[in-house]
Image: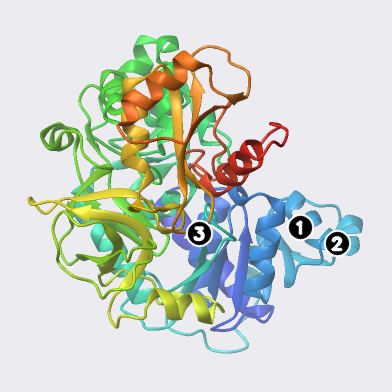
Amino acid sequence: MISFAELDDRVAALADGLRRIGVRPGHRVALLVPPGIDLTAAVYACWQAGAVIVVADAGLGWRRMADALRSAGPDYMIGIPGAVAAAAALKLPGIRLVAGELPKTIRRLLGVGHSIDELGTRANQRGPLLDPPPAPIAPWAAQSTEAAVLFTSGATGPPKGVVYRHHQLRAQLDQVRSLCKVTPHDRLVAAFAPFALYGPALGIGAVVPQMDVTKPGTLTAAGLADAAAIIEATLVFASPAALRNVVATAGQLTPAQSSALARIRLVLSAGAPVSVSLLRRVQQVLPRAELHTPYGMTEALPLTDISLPELDEAGPGNGVCVGRPLPGVQIQISRFDPLGRACGSPEPVVEISGEICVAAAHVKDRYDRLWATERESSRNPGWHRTGDVGHLDAAGRLWVEGRLVHVITTADGPVTPVGLEQRIEAGSSVTGAAVVGVGPRGTQQVVAVVVPNSPTPVGLAPQELAAAVRGAAGVRLAAVLAIEALPVDIRHAAKIDRQRLARWAERLLAGGRAGRP
């Protein structure tokens, strides 16, 4: 535990230390530190020193994280001992600083010059700064300077660096404050690493629960309750995978832990579709909480919001209903052409599927060093093309139907996957479903890949199961395939890798061995 006054002193001291070793405004500092006090202090110290933080979380996996850091080209790197060792082995760029204890002999071998504890101590012991410090730079200050390079989850390709300026982070913070109706009396349990940094910026206490942040499903009900009890939390942010395990382990709660969870007034869950059935089970564990599922992405978060009662009001539909745009957010649709490409300009059309396009003050500045990707995503001035597909209904609510790269291009026109998957999961004996396209673009066949409730050999689904899936889908399926588990992204453990499944299905249907996707 640390007070705001102690955190402020620690940030100021570390910022001074960073400036002393050469960190200057505009320098990039990669942070390979798990959520906690060290990470929080490092982030705000970098901003006070005028540096740009580079955050590629461990949820990407080491190979992808290394590629991401190379692409960002950091000048400095702050990491825990294991991360520093890995950075040295992988020859990642940046002058290395360690967060934690490391023997001097090992530090020399790894090329580590300083620890962040030493930098903070020295700043307090030495005389005046060599150079006058710049004005403090923080996300709540209206600055046009660059603040951060954040990386996407890489669920549909290599992780992309997303550049934010300080005024865009401030706008994002304002949206979160408004969405959560934050008061000085609130306290936050952040079961998703990036949200751990919101607490200080919002002026409220925050805690990260006991869990492996690279594996959201490791959060237990007891872990959430214990974290909530420490700070008397009122707010929770957790991914759907984390909430699923909270529900699964709720039977192990003590009366005191149940009481701590009963104080929670608001739960936010995002990063992947959240089912109504899961939210209802969560409601039983956190009886007084309002349950909300905002929609957004690394490039712009949050954009819309919807609560459990509003989900009940919306009912089933083609995709996941994520609610109405938040104040200051505009959402329009770019229509499909016959080959499933979103070629048109954004339009305020209703009940027409296409690429979701957004405009808001807290949308990213640009993709980092990805000229073609940036040009494609911002080819309509003032709009960010999200790569998600969906539609707006007559009530102004947004329904997400999948990703643009997952659209199936049949001879009869484009087919989006999420609505079909929902119907299959609701109407047949499966615990999960993914719909993919097999064959040449424009004449693709629709294939369902399902996880049966009972053990089933991998490959073509048994006739009875296949018939149930076809009946639930309500569209012509070329094949129904059974699999043990759907491949998902590492960060959220919820986004289905449909491209990987499509390659597997195509190989299997061409006579190849089933194996693993």
Nearer the observer, 154 or 427: 427
Q: CA distance from mark 3 to mark 2?
A: 29 Å
Which of the numbered marks, if any, corresponds to residue 84?
Answer: 1
- The answer to whether the residue labelled 1 contacts the one labelled 2, judged by CB atoms less than 8 Å apart, is yes
* Residue labelled with disc 3: 152
Left or right: where 299 falls relative to 259: right
- Using the rendered view, name the quadrant where residue 112 is placed: bottom right
Q: As drawn, which residue projects farthest toward the left?
A: 395
Left or right: where 84 falls relative to 71: right
Residue 459 showing in the rendered view: yes
Neighbour tally class for label 1: few under 14, some 14-19, many 20 plus, Cα within 10 Å? many
* Residue labelled with disc 2: 110
Q: Residue at x 58, y 27 (%)?
A: 483
**Residue 255, relative to residue 131: is it above or below?**
above
Q: Residue at x 70, y 61 (%)?
A: 66
Neighbour tally class for label 2: few under 14, some 14-19, many 20 plus, Cα within 10 Å? some
Q: Name which residue type carries label 3.
A: Thr
Where is the C terminus found, in terms of image quarters?
A: top right
Nearer the observer, 229 or 162: 162
> What percent of the width, then of the height, locates residue 253?
41, 13
Q: Earlier in the sequence, mark 1 or mark 3?
A: 1
> What percent of the width, then of the height, locates residue 465?
46, 17
**Residue 234, relative to residue 456: is it above or below?**
below
Q: CA distance from mark 1 to mark 2?
A: 7 Å
Q: As drawn, which residue projects farthest toward the bottom?
A: 131
